[in-house]
Amino acid sequence: MDASFWNGKRPPGVGNAVNPDEYSSILSVINAFLNENSSHPAFTGIGHTLTYSDIDLYSQQFAAYIQRNTDLQPGDRIAIQMPNLLQYPIVVYGALRAGLVIVNTNPLYTAREMLHQFKDSGAKALVFFENFGDLVEEVVGQTDIKYLFVTRLADMVPAPKRQVVNFLVKYVKKMVPRYSLPKAVPLLDTFRAGKACDYQPVREGKLSDPVVLQYTGGTTGVAKGAILTNRNLIANMLQSQEMLSQVDKQGQKILKAGQETLIAPLPLYHIYAFTVHLMCMPFMGNHSILIANPRDTGTFIKLIKPWRFTAFIGLNTLFASLLNHPKFKECDLSGLKVTLSGGTALQEATAQRWHKETGCIVSEAYGLTECSPAVCMNPAGDLSQPGTAGLPIPSTELKTIDENGDETAVGEPGELCVRGPQVMSGYWQRAEATAEVLSADGWLKTGDVAVIQEDGFVRIVDRIKDMILVSGFNVYPNEIEDVVSGHPKVANCAAIGVPDENSGEKVKLFVIKSDDSLTSDELLSWCRDYLTAYKVPKVCEFRDELPMTPVGKILRKDLRQSEVVN
């Protein structure tokens, strides 16, 4: 479907197209917004705020250290593994200023998951949070990582609070396991050493050059690195900014550049938060409040209570947890103008409760890693259409196709396909996997069944793949089954997603035993040793047999259907 179908359908103030080619690289964008917004607050974490000028200085020092004290070259990959700390934007911008390619890594990964991502990306450097140093020690010798940089929770907080908090974390709360990585350089030391070096701006590459390898799963369960280029990131930043340029009935922009305070509880390693808080909002000169551990709802509320925030970026699980906490009502919600939800389906009951409690309608959005990630976004306020993914962002073409690849009509369901400047160039070193989803003329198959309505809004109907969506995170059955089948008492197994009121979906496991002594507790304990917490099955059912095709392929759809019947 031609992009012009949506002309005139987007909210007032939003254009129909963007031009990512007006910038030479994402580095030129970063340099511009750090300079232009120097006196504005940029990020707040653990109660301390850094301005854009502060971020500019520290990121230059980190870049200078890399240039003068390592042999890392532009194009080399650097993995970043930490929660939402002030160090995150500093390291991202500093690494990009040194010409490196970012590999965002989930800090909750197990050693097995870390090893795959580090080896697959060919990362030569890693910045890690000390609380995960034991896992880094376990895997780093099996990778090409040559340079290690370690950071602590309160490193960017002024003394003496920095020393007090870091001491409490390590010695009182005992949250830092023992590890030995003598070559790991404290991140704070790189800033000190970087002061003595003159940062030399790197030669900007081409718009088609990779900037981020963002890992995502697939139907095979093998995590693949989506190659996001300069042009991809610039495009999605401009597209998102344009959608947020909606005006009210008086013709005034709802969100104003340099005047907004956003709550940022979603992890920055996730492409949704990465693009919103590290690209789009800084481009607008706005301020993000970083939440390192959003699962601790009480502390979460304490961190946002001092602020009259104007925008909230979250998902269903977070909204529900806040609404269920009695102290959330103590927050100043009087300035909240925009609430964005993405990553997983927004439940109607949660959306209604949020609107009632905050006075702000939740605008649901849709995207995927391969699209940097935004594809569709609902307008703010009364123009939002609950239950839909919203309208395609500017310069985005959509179509739906049937099983033969033929385009379906407006109002008819089909697999959603996307074409636009935000679509990845491919999967890192996986030509076959790329060809499966990305056509020669740039159409990306999403694997999601959708309906494009007459009014232009897009409704996601179902998922073609067997992917399970837990609190916005992709969980792939084959990965679960691979781990479970490694247990000596398991003969066969299958994993599916079942509805869960808190996380949207949870993993349910079906198992055929090879040893009758196997218990659910034993099996789930095994899973916790090899899988990130959100991937661990919540329910385990033992069976004598599993539904299969004549060639022995487990029919997960039959298992899902049996859950519906029961």
Image (cartoon, rainbow, N blue to C red):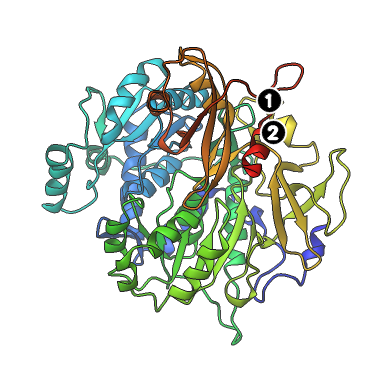
- Nearer-the-camera pick, 316 or 209: 316
Give the vertical position of 429 relative to 360 (above or below): above
* Residue wearing tag 1: 547
Badge 1 crowding class, 10 Å Cα cut-off, few under 14, some 14 to 19, many 20 or more, is: some
- Give percent across and percent down for residue 420: 71, 50
- Report the residue at 74% width, 37% height from top: 438
Can residue 163 be seen here? yes
Q: Are marks 1 and 2 in contact (CB under 8 Å)?
A: yes
Left or right relative to 391: residue 192: left
Q: Secondary structure at mark 2?
A: helix
Vertical side of 286 occupied by 555: above or below: above
At 14% across and 53% down in the image, what residue appears? Answer: 161
Q: Is residue 100 visible?
A: no
Specify which label sits upstream in the sequence, 1 or 2: 1
Kind of residue indicated by mark 2: Asp
Q: Quarter holding the N terminus?
A: bottom right
Q: Which residue is mark 2?
A: 558
What quarter of the picture does the C terminus occupy? Answer: top right
Query: With 166 as the anchor, is 477 left or right in this view?
Result: right
Residue 197 image point, x, y percent? 29, 40
* Foreground residue among 324 and 198: 324
Quadrant position of residue 211: top right
Callout 2: 10 Å neighbours few (<14), some, many (20+)? few
The residue sitting at 69% across, 33% down in the picture is 558
Q: Against 215, is 164 above or below?
A: below
Give the residue type that dot 1 points to. Pro
Q: Is residue 458 left or right of residue 74?
A: right
